[in-house]
Amino acid sequence: MSAVSLLDQTRDFLARQHGHYIGGQRHANSENAYLEVVNPATEEVIARVAAAGASDVDAAVRSAQSGFASWQEVLPAQKERVLNALADKMADNRDLLAQLETLQSGKTINLSRAFEVDQAVGFLRYYAGWAQRITGQTIQPSIPATGQERYTAFTRREPLGVVVGIVPWNFSIMTAVWKLASALVTGNSIVIKPSEYTPLTMLKLAELAHEAGLPAGALNVVTGDGQVGQQLLTHEGTSKISFTGSVATGSKVGAAAMEASLTRVTLELGGKNPMGVLPDADMDKVADGMIEAGFLYTGQICAEAEKFFVPRSRLDELGDKLVARLKQFKIGSPLDTETDFGPVANMDHYRKLQGIFQQIADNGNTVLHGGYSLAGTGCYVAPTALLAHSIDDPLIREETFGPIATLLPYDDEDELLAYMNHGPYGLAASLWTESLSTAMRLIPQVQAGMVWVNMHTVLDPAVPFGGVKSSGLGREFGEAFIDDFTELKSVMIRY
Ligand code: NAD
């Protein structure tokens, strides 16, 4: 056991009477309504946060409107400095942020440090670097002159105004950083609504942003459930929604945004991501890859693989290698640095996974490993691998968002592609082969916003990310985010 001890700062933060973060300061809740934050490893209530009422939502959007007025005037080099100063503050508070995240989400402390802080800091610095590089174009129009006049044209990238960022529970810091960094570097202000399960880290991050020099109102945080998200996105002062979450909620959010006033919307949604194994692949590398692809953070990653298509002749071999690895997992407290498999993030999700285990039993699937929840306190389930009956098996169709790998054999390349493209989703996919030419031939035929070869789940801020089909609308990262967080204004001049 190497359990980390909680910092005094962590204990103090948990014990606070939390409100929202509006206008550059802590803002008391307008209503006597609260949400309990529960540690999924112990089932203990660790903090209470405010459940916003309509007047808190209104105050946050109004604050963001005045924050927008001042932030859009800040010169690009200063924007870059402020965002980098926030990255520094996050790095300085690495242990505090990681502990809060582990306590509220069950993510192992190693993952909280590596992804929620270190990687989020890297993403923030990447976005900061765009501040001085966002440009328009000059264009020569072909309008014929009738006299001595001439024409020229140019485009400007202008901020949209108030962005509302709605964040899921699986990566409470990193997903929020993607949104606030995209919004702020392009000159917008933002109101973030964290998930009701994981609101603590964002409340801390907002304080750090203020200390880093962000003007009051540029970043606001309102806590509450989906209803609060709905009120924010339909508020008349909101110009854009950046949503990450489930397909079901994302569809409602998209419809409400259109209905409200054609409000701009980016949707980063779920999937049922395939991993396609070619017959020539090295099965030890593939089995290691399946652990990375399907079991990191107990499978609660939007880009994780959930369905694995394997050449029939190699199914038994790969199944054995996977099970050998799953048996090695050290399941335990997420605060222990030696744990590599902690609880799932909350009791609602745990119950959903219990329902899926029952479905597997009822469906008569061959279970290679796991297939049950673990007895005792906490939201623990066994890492699970099973065989699907066919491509129409419900386990192949619906996102479980859990550590459940479903394997299905295929017979030829056409069948592999048909299987990989089956279903309504298209967030991410991976191909596993020793032949780069095979991979290059197949990549254009895979229906997904991201295709990895011999890797899976790893993201980089310079590489655009987002789904096709029902997995989303718009792209984050790279240069692509600029389109989604600015309006393109065209200017034509006669002189
Ligand atoms: P969710 O859709 O239940 O909730 C996401 C957020 O939306 C929460 O903050 C919630 O309070 C809010 N919300 C709920 N109803 C709302 C409404 N009607 N209007 C506005 N906001 C509302 O998702 P979740 O369970 O928190 O997260 C898991 C899901 O997120 C999975 O499906 C996963 O695949 C997806 N996800 C996608 C990405 C991506 O980048 N594509 C990343 C992470 C998670």
Image (tube, grey):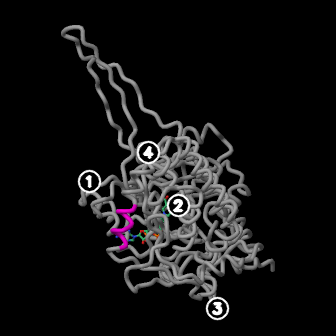
Quarter location, residue 457: bottom right
As drawn, is 108 to the left or to the right of 306?
right
Give the distance between the C-alpha atoms of the residues marked 1 and 3, in whole angstroms.
49 Å
Give the distance between the C-alpha atoms of the residues marked 3 and 2, in whole angstroms.
31 Å
User: Residue tagged by mark 2?
Assistant: 175
User: Residue tagged by mark 1?
Assistant: 262
Residue drawn at the location 44% of the way across and 78% of the way down: 28
Q: Where is residue 492 in the image (x, y as percent from the top left)?
A: 29, 26
Most extreme residue toward the bottom, as rendered?
376
Q: What stretch is highlighted in magenta?
A: 56-63
Tell which tag, 3 or 2, sits nearer the viewer.
Answer: 2
Residue drawn at the location 46% of the way across and 57% of the way down: 218
Please say if the residues under marks 3 and 2 sit with CB atoms less than 8 Å apart: no
Give the residue type at disc 1: Leu
As drawn, is 181 to the left or to the right of 137?
right
Give the distance between the C-alpha atoms of the residues marked 1 and 4, in whole angstroms.
26 Å
The prevailing secondary structure element of the residues shown in magenta is helix
Give the residue type at disc 4: Glu
Is 341 situated above or below 118? below
Q: Position of residue 279 (x, y in %)?
A: 64, 50
User: Residue tagged by mark 3?
Assistant: 376
Tell which tag, 1 or 4, sits nearer the viewer.
Answer: 4
Q: Nearer the viewer, residue 52 or 332?
A: 52
